[in-house]
Each structure stands twice: as C-alpha cells, then as structure tokens.
Amino acid sequence: MALTATLIPGDGIGPGITAATIRILEAAGAPFEWDQQLAGVSATEHGLDPLPAATLESIESRRIALKGPLTTPIGSGFRSINVALRKHFDLYANVRPAKTILPDARYPGLDLVIVRENTEGLYAGIEHFIGMDKDPKAVAESVMLITRYGSDRIVRFAFEYALQHGRERVTLVHKANILKCTQGLFLEVGRHVAEEYADRIDYDERIVDATAMQLVLDPYQFDVIVTENMFGDILSDEVAGLIGGLGFAPGANLGTDAAIFEAVHGSAPDIAGLGIANPSSLLLAAGLMLDHMGERVLADRVRTALSETLHEGSVLTGDLGGDASTEEFASAVIERL
Ligand code: NAI
C-alpha cells in the first residue's frame, strides 16, 4: 500500500539531498506517493508566500511531511518558516535521536534521545525593549513561558516514547534551582507524571549545566532526556556533536495532528548547487518517518545500508574527507541495500 506524505525539498542544498534521499527510498522499496510543495526562499522565488497555503493544506491532509532545510533571511525579511510550521501544526515535541553511525567515532555505540519541548520557554518569543532617556533599547526583556499543560504533555510524551521504543530511563533536565517558578513548575509537573510510570520506566533529574558536562564525560549514562525548549535546542546540538556532527542528526517535530521530519543542518548556502552535500541527515530523518509510519523494517534497511557505506569508506562526501558527489554517495548506499 502506498505511503502518502508531503515533500518539501527546501532551499540551498535541500533539493539535491532530497533527490538523493528519494532515490534511496525508492530503491529500498518504500512505496511513497509524494505531494511535492514549496516553502521558504524557493517559494518566494516563484512569487509565492514563504509558507504557501497549498503547502499547509498538503500537510493538513497528509499529516506527514519530509522537509529539506529552509533558509531564514538574517536581520530582515520573513521569519523562520520552521518556527511557523511548528506553531501552525502545534508540533510540540522535537525528537532528536543521537546514535553513533560513523566508524572511529569518539563515543562508539552511543544511543540516546533528546525530547525537547518545541513551543514554550524563551522561544515563545515574548520579548520587548524598554526605552529610557534617549535610548529606545535601554533594556530588553524576554518571558520564559512555561505552562502546566505544556509541561505535562511533553514529559508524558517522553515516557510514552520510552515505552514504545524499549528505553529504560527518562532524565528530566531543568534549572529549577535558580528559576524557581518557571523551571520549578516544569520539574513539579514532571515528577507528577513520572510517578504514573514508576513501575515501568526509571526516572531521574539533572540540572542543565551539569548535564552539559556529564554528556561529554560519560554520555552513556543517559537514555531519554526530556527538557524545555531552549535547553533542548542547545543539548541536542551538543549530542549531535558527540556522534560526529549535525550531518548525522535527524529530527522529528511531532504533534497530535501532524509530524514533520527534517535534516537538522541548514541549507548550506556555501555549497548549494555544487552537488557535493551529504544527504545522511535527511536520509536518517526519512528513517524516523518510516518508523513513525510503522515501517520499521524498511527504515532499518536504509539505516544499515547507510552505516555500511560509511564503514566501508571508499565513497564519501567532502564533509567526511571524501570527494564523492551527493549522487555518487546515494548510489553507494543503494548498492548496499
Ligand atoms: P548550515 O547547517 O547550513 O551550514 C553550516 C556548515 O555546515 C556549512 O559550512 C555547510 O556547508 C555545512 N553543511 C551543512 N549541511 C551539510 C551537508 N548536508 N553536507 C555537507 N556540508 C554541510 O548552517 P548555516 O550556514 O548557519 O545556515 C544556513 C541557512 O540554513 C540559514 O538561512 C539558516 O537559517 C538555515 N537553517 C535552516 C535549518 C532548517 O531548515 N531546519 C536549520 C539550521 C539552519
């Protein structure tokens, strides 16, 4: 039976790594019917809104999308389309698995997951300047929004994720020692939810700064980490670094009505159009999408072929020290399927 999903190739290197990913999925026998849509700069270049209504409608009806990176203009121009998509579909959970796939990795066999709250905290964007005397920007103020509802659903999501994926422990990461109201509420709600799962999933708590250090000293002690928006943003890039960089980190943005899977790196304008980008992150995101759709066998097939290609090491893109093009790398993965 065909799997239906929206496909947003994205900007910069997006179309190139998307084409490579689709070719690999087809060769793996993943029966996708894609509805291709535009967003970001590639949409504005076609005279469309950066987040066209047709793209939103496509995701609304298919409920699943695979998305290449989207360029966000700096300083002026439209606001982040990634953030707009998260808000529009209330994609409250950002899931970033970090699993070692590269040979000679610093942390062999590492396998942990960060579950980040995606809609609240400082990133809710409630901020303003306060003018004083002749300085209109004398003070800048930002609100860290934490709700009982938002905390409950993200911690609950982390426990459910742990149960569904055979994980053993959830670690709640916070800064309640300093931010007693906001972080204190997140911790209080988290403890409450953890009690409901006490007989099935272990639970512990860490302060965010200590977690950042422990992740470098001994990341193996972690299994599933759940945390608020900004801490999750920072820690998920840190764990991507532990497994060899953003090029091997896929991300899933999940809500109750839609799910968007993406490469977590950007549109790489410095190498756009050269055909040399590494498609691994988007391919791993497609693997998460297949898992989400219940196609675990297909997903594992793709991940194994990617892992074997990297371990064999003769066909690698420039970021990995090789000189293969995106398409040559994709062909090497296909040979190993
Ligand atoms: P970037 O991730 O695009 O690039 C950083 C460096 O990594 C560059 O040297 C680039 O060539 C390299 N790189 C990234 N992906 C690569 C790949 N697949 N293969 C080989 N090399 C790769 O980050 P940057 O330059 O800060 O952002 C560029 C644009 O991307 C910005 O407009 C930013 O807003 C956007 N962006 C979009 C994201 C998304 O759509 N999820 C996430 C991060 C950034």
Image: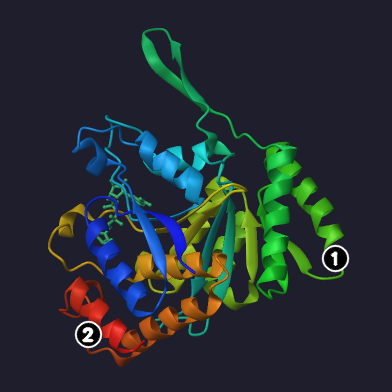
Which quadrant of the structure image shows residue 291?
bottom right
Three-letter code for the amino acid on which mark 2 is drawn: Val
Helix, strand or loop for disc 2: loop
Q: Which residue is drawn at 78% across and 47% down?
A: 189
Position in image of residue 306 (x %, y %): 37, 81
Mark 1: amino acid: Ala
Q: Name the residue under label 2.
A: 315
* Image region (quadrant) for ligand 1: bottom left
Residue 24 falls left or right of residue 142 = left
| Residue 320 on image: x %, y % | 26, 77
Q: Earlier in the sequence, mark 2 or mark 1?
A: 1
For mark 1, give the secondary structure. Answer: loop
**Residue 329 appearing in the image:** yes
- Which residue sits at x=36%, y=65%? 282
Q: In which quarter of the image is the C terminus?
A: bottom left
Report whether 297 appears left or right of 31.
Answer: right
Q: Residue at 24% across / 57% down in the picture?
A: 15
Density class for disc 2 (Cα within 10 Å; few <14, some 14-19, many ≥20) is many
Task: Name the spot of residue 270 as percent of width and height, x first.
Answer: 17, 56
**Left or right: 318 in relation to 120:** left
Query: Image quarter for residue 219?
Result: bottom right
> Which residue ends up furthest to the front in the rendered image?
1
Say if disc 2 is inside 8 Å of ligand 1. Answer: no
User: Residue extending furthest bottom?
Assistant: 312
Q: Name the residue under label 1.
A: 198
Q: Can residue 171 be seen in the rendering of this structure?
A: no
Disc 2 and disc 1 in contact, CB within 8 angstroms: no
The x, y position of residue 16, in whole percent, is 22, 62
Above or below, 317 against 238 in this view is below
Here the colouring is rainbow
